[in-house]
Each structure stands twice: as structure tokens, then as C-alpha cells.
Image (spheres, rainbow, N blue to C red):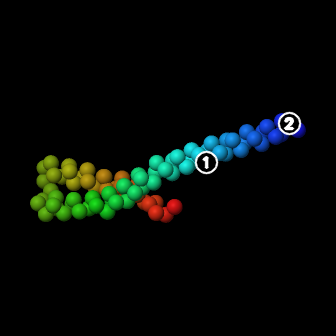
Amino acid sequence: MSGASTTANDHSSLDSESSSGTNALQMVMAPVRFLGFWAAIALPFLYVPLLFDGIGGSRAIVFVVLIALNAVALVAGHDHRRA
């Protein structure tokens, strides 16, 4: 009988450790989602001057980097305020 209670206690301690790890991950991800969400909104405003002046030479690289950053921000901020 004592072996059964020890096993139950082991499982409950594992569950509490995994839930605390999940809580820590959620605490870290909340600001990442927040920043990703707002970056995804703000970054397109940087396209306007690039498109207005024309995309040529090094500006094309900047434009592609902005598109990539916007894609990353969209993925990171996708679940902001859903949870």
C-alpha cells in the first residue's frame, strides 16, 4: 500500500512541476505576443517611404528584411489576447 501512495505523490509532483513550467512559459510568451502583435501593426508604416522613394539597390534588401520581420511579427503576435 505504501508503494501506491508514493507513486501517486510522484505523479502529483510531476504535474505541479510541469504546470509551473507551463506558467513560466506563458509569462515569457505574453510579452513576446504583445510585441509581435504591435510590431505587425507598426511595420507596414515603414513600407510607405520605401515605396514612395522607389525600391532599388540597397533599399530592396531593406524592403525584403522588413517583409520578413513583419512575417515573424505576425506569427509571434497571432495569439495575442486570445488566451
- Categorize mark 1 by other alpha carbons within 10 Å: few (<14), some (14-19), many (20+): few
Percent across and percent down for residue 13 are 69, 41
The residue that disc 1 covers is: 19
Q: In which quarter of the image is residue 47?
A: bottom left
Percent across and percent down for residue 67 are 28, 55
Q: Which residue occupies 71% across, 44% down?
A: 12
Earlier residue among tags 2 and 1: 2
Residue lying furthest top in this view?
A: 3
Nearer to the camera, 22 or 46? 22
Percent across and percent down for residue 49 are 15, 61
Q: Which residue occupies 51% across, 47% down?
A: 25
Mark yes or no: residue 52 visible: yes
Left or right of residue 44: residue 77: right
Q: Quadrant of residue 78?
A: bottom left
Left or right of residue 66: residue 4: right
Percent across and percent down for residue 54 are 12, 59
Left or right of residue 17: residue 45: left
The residue that disc 2 covers is: 2
Q: Identity of the amino acid at label 1?
A: Ser
Q: Distance between the residues labelled 2 and 1?
A: 26 Å
Q: Identity of the amino acid at label 2?
A: Ser
